[in-house]
Image (tube, rainbow, N blue to C red):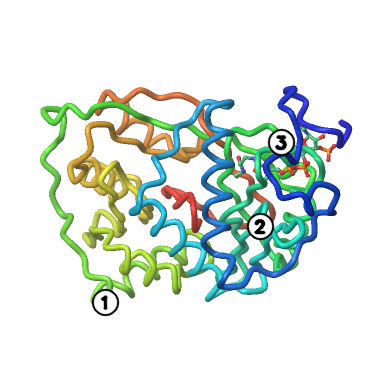
C-alpha cells in the first residue's frame, strides 16, 4: 500500500495546522508533561473520527472524560517514560504513542495520529518508538481501524478477533451470586497480584494504584471454587482475572449487577473466553465482533481474563 494517504479516500491534508506546519516533517520525540493536554485532545479526536468511520462510539469530551484521559497519559508518562512519545509537526502535537512494561510484559496503551495526517507513515514511526521498550512478550487491545491492524501485524503481532457484548441489562436475569465480596485495594492487593501474575506472568503493579485513584470499585472472590478479582465501571467490567471459569463467571455477574448506566458493555472477549460469552448471552446482551487482541510471545494463559483496554 502506498503512503500517499488513506485508502478509504479520506483527505490527507494539513489544512488544520498552522502555516509553518504545512511542509514541516513529522518528528517523533519523547512526550513531556506539557504535551499532555494536547496529546489527550489529539487522541480523543482521532479515535472519535475513526469511530465514525469504523463503527464505534467515543464518549463526548466533557470535563470528566478529558481529566480521565489526561490522567491515563500522565500515569504512563510517570511509570513508563521510555515508552511515551508524541508525533510533532513544527511544535504541534499530532500524535501520541504510549507503552507500558510490567515485569517484561509490554502493552501498547495508546497509538493515535491526527485524522488529517493518517496513512502517511507517522503511525509507523510512533509505534516503532514505543516498541523500543519491547524486550519480551507484548499485547495490544486494537481498534477496528484497518490501518492499526496493518501496523500491528506488520510489527509481528498475531491478530485475534475479539467480541463485544452490549445492551440494556435486564436485571431480572441477574443470578444471586455468592462468594464474592467488595475488595480493598490495600487489603486484597496480594490476592489480585497473585492471581494476575499467574494469568499474565506479570503483576498489575502501579496500574492498581491508577485504578484505585480512579475510584473503580474492586470485587474479589477467594473460595475453594476459585479466586479472582474484577474492577467495575458504571458501564461494565474494566478488568477481570480468576483462577477458574466458575469464579470468573461469578465476578462477571457481579460487575454486571454493579452497572449503573442504561447500556452496559463487556469488551475484549477472545475465543478462549467462552465462559464470558456464556455469561453475556445469559444476560441477553447483544454479541458482535469488535476489536482485536494483538499478541507477541508468551504472555501466560490470559484466561479466564478480561483485559483492561488501556493498561492490559
Ligand atoms: C492507527 C493509526 C495510529 C496508524 O497511524 P497512521 O499514521 O495512519 O499509520 P501509517 O501511515 O504508518 O500506516 C498505515 C498503514 O495502513 C495502510 N492504509 C492506509 N489506509 C488504509 C485503509 N483504509 N485500510 C487499510 N490500510 C490502510 C497504509 O498504506 C500503511 O501501510 P504500509 O505502511 O504497509 O503501506 C492511525 O491511523 C489512527 O490514529 N487511527 C485512529 C485511532 C486508532 O484507531 N488508533 C489505534 C488504536 S489501537
Image quadrant holding the N terminus, namely top right
The residue lying at 74 percent from left, 28 percent from top is: 11
Contact, mark 1 vs mark 3 (Cβ under 8 Å) = no
Q: Count of labels shown?
A: 3
Q: CA distance from mark 1 to mark 3?
A: 41 Å
The label on residue 298 is none
Q: Is mark 3 within 8 Å of ligand 1?
A: yes
Q: Going from the N terminus, do you reach mark 3 or mark 2 first?
A: 2
Considering the numbered disc 3 on the image, is that residue within a helix, a strand or a loop? helix
For disc 3, the marked residue is 147
Q: Is mark 1 within 8 Å of ligand 1?
A: no
> Is 212 left, or right, of 151 in this rendering?
left
Residue 222, image quadrant: bottom left
Of tags 3 and 2, the one toward the viewer is: 2
Q: CA distance from mark 3 to mark 2?
A: 20 Å
For disc 1, the marked residue is 186
The residue lying at 33 percent from left, 30 percent from top is: 278
Considering the numbered disc 1 on the image, is that residue within a helix, a strand or a loop? loop
The residue lying at 18 percent from left, 55 percent from top is: 180
Q: Residue furthest right?
A: 2
Figure quarter occupied by ligand 1: top right
Between 269 and 62, the one nearer to me in the picture: 62
> Is 287 left, or right, of 83 in this rendering?
left
Question: Which x, y percent locates residue 35?
Answer: 59, 66
Of tags 1 and 3, the one toward the viewer is: 3
> Is 175 left, or right, of 277 in this rendering?
left
**Mark 2 crowd level (few <14, some 14–19, many ≥20, 10 Å Cα):** many
Question: Which x, y percent locates residue 74?
Answer: 50, 69
Q: Going from the N terminus, do you reach mark 1 or mark 3 first?
A: 3
**Mark 3 crowd level (few <14, some 14–19, many ≥20, 10 Å Cα):** some
For disc 2, the marked residue is 93
> Is 107 left, or right, of 136 in this rendering?
left
Amino acid at each position: 500500500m502506498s503512503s500517499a494517504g488513506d485508502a478509504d479516500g479520506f483527505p490527507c491534508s494539513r489544512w488544520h495546522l498552522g502555516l509553518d506546519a504545512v511542509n514541516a516533517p513529522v518528528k517523533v520525540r519523547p512526550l513531556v508533561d506539557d504535551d499532555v493536554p494536547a496529546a489527550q485532545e489529539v487522541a480523543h479526536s482521532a479515535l472519535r473520527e475513526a469511530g465514525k468511520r469504523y463503527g464505534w462510539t467515543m464518549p463526548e469530551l466533557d470535563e470528566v472524560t478529558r481529566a480521565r484521559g489526561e490522567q491515563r497519559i500522565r500515569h504512563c508518562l510517570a511509570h513508563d517514560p521510555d515508552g511515551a512519545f508524541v508525533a510533532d509537526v513544527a511544535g504541534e502535537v499530532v500524535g501520541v504513542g504510549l507503552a507500558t512494561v510490567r515485569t517484561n510484559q509490554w502493552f501498547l496503551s495508546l497509538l493515535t495520529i491526527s485524522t488529517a495526517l493518517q496513512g502517511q507513515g507517522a503511525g509507523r514511526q510512533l509505534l516503532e518508538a514505543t516498541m523500543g521498550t519491547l524486550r519480551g512478550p507484548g499485547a495490544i487491545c486494537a481498534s477496528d481501524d484497518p490501518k492499526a491492524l496493518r501496523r500491528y501485524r506488520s510489527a509481528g503481532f498475531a491478530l485475534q478477533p475479539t467480541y463485544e457484548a452490549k445492551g440494556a441489562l435486564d436485571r431480572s436475569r441477574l443470578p444471586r451470586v455468592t462468594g464474592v465480596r467488595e475488595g480493598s485495594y490495600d487489603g486484597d492487593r496480594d490476592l489480585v497480584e497473585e492471581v494476575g501474575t499467574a494469568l499474565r506472568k506479570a503483576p498489575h503493579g502501579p496500574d492498581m494504584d491508577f485504578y484505585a485513584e480512579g475510584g473503580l470499585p474492586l470485587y474479589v472472590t477467594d473460595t475453594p471454587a476459585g479466586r479472582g478479582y474484577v474492577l467495575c465501571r458504571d458501564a461494565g467490567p474494566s478488568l477481570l482475572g480468576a483462577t477458574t471459569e466458575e469464579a470468573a463467571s461469578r465476578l462477571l455477574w457481579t460487575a454486571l449487577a454493579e452497572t449503573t448506566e442504561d447500556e452496559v458493555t463487556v469488551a475484549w472477549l477472545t475465543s478462549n473466553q467462552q465462559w464470558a460469552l456464556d455469561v453475556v448471552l445469559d444476560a441477553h446482551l447483544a454479541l458482535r465482533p469488535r476489536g482485536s487482541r494483538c499478541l507477541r510471545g508468551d504472555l501466560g494463559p490470559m484466561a479466564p481474563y478480561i483485559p483492561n483496554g488501556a493498561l492490559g
